Image (spheres, coloured by chain):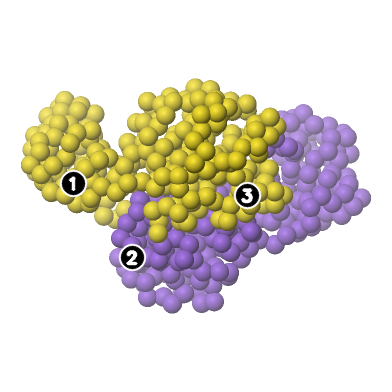
Chain colours: A purple, B yellow
């Protein structure tokens, strides 16, 4: 991040000459925290129109304006990979959401499982985290965050064309699942990570019986949920995604 | 972790019928926190003799004894992969150390770089974290933790037979490095992760000029240090390591 430059997500159309409004939080960050002012240049993106160079035209206490100057990077679509995970403690859920953005997941799907302890997943909070992570990691597109739903319900409404790569912790160390890379499926795909307590026997049986679910092993050690999420997303991106 | 069972690292020879001593910390954890007592069974390992089933024979306040009952898993060597990383803030350094254990790095090498903010790496603290992480993730072997040293010094004494896979953040998004998997090198190998501020221009030039260093891209987004470490270790294990 040596070339670090301020980068803001703005939910507004971006085009040359366009005037862009900053809300109070953005103005506070830009002018208060970062000490920028009129004439300062920064990068902006909205998830649809690519990345643009913008210049501060008005700096106020409760808002401000930018002028959209010129395009820097064209919009690129994310690879068609979803992350299904069981929300855990608040800080670790935030962490997993941040990593999903860094690793280019296109959709974040919180699933409530028999062993999920934290039933409260706040999608609004997760979306704020997504924006922040996208600003920091240079993502052009924000993954969609859906509301949490029971795993059984998510599986019942699943489109069988999308293969679920299930990081099966019981496959670890036992060789029950296909090992890492060969076990993956190409797009459209989803990675499924269990809760800290693992899936229940009933859930495991259900998953094993579904034609669109494939268990993969992530090695002989038991990975924590966030490690498994990062590892599985990275393997998929390196093999089928936008790391090519 | 549905089959979770207490697992202790003991720095003592393990063999059938062997009596094992517990120190005060282990006794406190086992008898105070976990409420175990005489007759309780648990798993023990020492990094050399595999994993054993053991039974509590004496439970005291300041110590205790176990009887080593029978072997559960034979010792397996770790893949020959090292992790070189720039220590960052304390909590994140602990986190990276934990992940290195989960992902089976054989040696943890902290390197001080031009942009490393935290110059204090406590190897004793890291080793305690290694033991704890190994107990939790089911590792049989503990990675070695060496003292922190300047990157230049580490590179000067490097054995050229061990390829360094450098997760080059400037290669990200620019296609400068070979993409993920094809950029990897087999064992013996090391993964090198930079500090949050990236490597300095001088360091980058040095790294680019070394025949045993290969820059790899971890995709079009900028990964934080811990994400890059997990992603690179996972890719390597899946391709060359013990995830096969």
Are tags 3 and 1 found on a single chain? yes
Q: Secondary structure at mark 1?
A: strand
Q: Say the numbered circle drawn on residue B217.
A: 3
Is residue A94 among the parts visible in the rendering?
A: no
| A78 up-or-down from A157: above or below | above
Report in which chain the residue with disc 1 lies.
Answer: B
Of circles 2 and 3, the one toward us is: 3
Q: Which residue is mark 1?
A: B52
- Nearer to me, B230 or A60: B230
**Disc 1 residue crowd, few under 14, some 14–19, many 20+, Cα 10 Å:** many
Q: CA distance from mark 2 to mark 3?
A: 31 Å
Q: Is residue A156 left or right of residue A61?
A: left
Q: CA distance from mark 1 to mark 2?
A: 22 Å
Q: Position of residue A190 (x, y in %)?
A: 52, 65
Residue drawn at 66 percent across, 49 percent down: B177
Q: Position of residue B75 (x, y in %)?
A: 25, 47
**Disc 3 residue crowd, few under 14, some 14–19, many 20+, Cα 10 Å:** many
Q: Position of residue A137 (x, y in %)?
A: 65, 46
């Amino acid at each position: 991040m040596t070339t670090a430059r301020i980068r803001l997500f703005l939910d507004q159309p971006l085009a040359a000459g366009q005037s862009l409004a900053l809300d109070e939080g953005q103005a506070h960050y830009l002018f208060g925290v970062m000490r920028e002012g009129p004439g300062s240049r920064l990068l902006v993106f909205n998830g649809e129109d690519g990345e643009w160079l913008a210049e501060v035209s008005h700096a106020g206490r409760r808002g401000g304006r930018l002028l959209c100057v010129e395009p820097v990077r064209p919009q690129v679509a994310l690879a068609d990979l979803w992350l299904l995970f069981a929300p855990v403690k608040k800080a670790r859920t935030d962490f997993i959401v941040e990593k999903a953005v860094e690793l280019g997941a296109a959709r974040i799907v919180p699933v409530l499982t028999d062993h999920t302890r934290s039933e409260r997943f706040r999608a609004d909070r997760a979306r704020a985290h997504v924006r922040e992570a996208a600003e920091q990691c240079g993502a052009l597109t924000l993954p969609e965050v859906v509301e949490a739903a029971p795993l059984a319900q998510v599986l019942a409404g699943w489109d069988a064309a999308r293969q679920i790569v299930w990081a099966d912790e019981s496959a670890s160390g036992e060789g029950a699942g296909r090992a890492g890379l060969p076990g993956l499926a190409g797009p459209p795909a989803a990675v499924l990570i269990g809760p800290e307590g693992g899936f229940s026997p009933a859930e495991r049986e259900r998953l094993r019986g579904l034609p669109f679910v494939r268990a993969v092993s992530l090695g002989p050690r038991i990975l924590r949920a966030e490690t498994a999420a990062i590892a599985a997303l990275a393997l998929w991106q390196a093999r089928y995604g936008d790391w090519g």
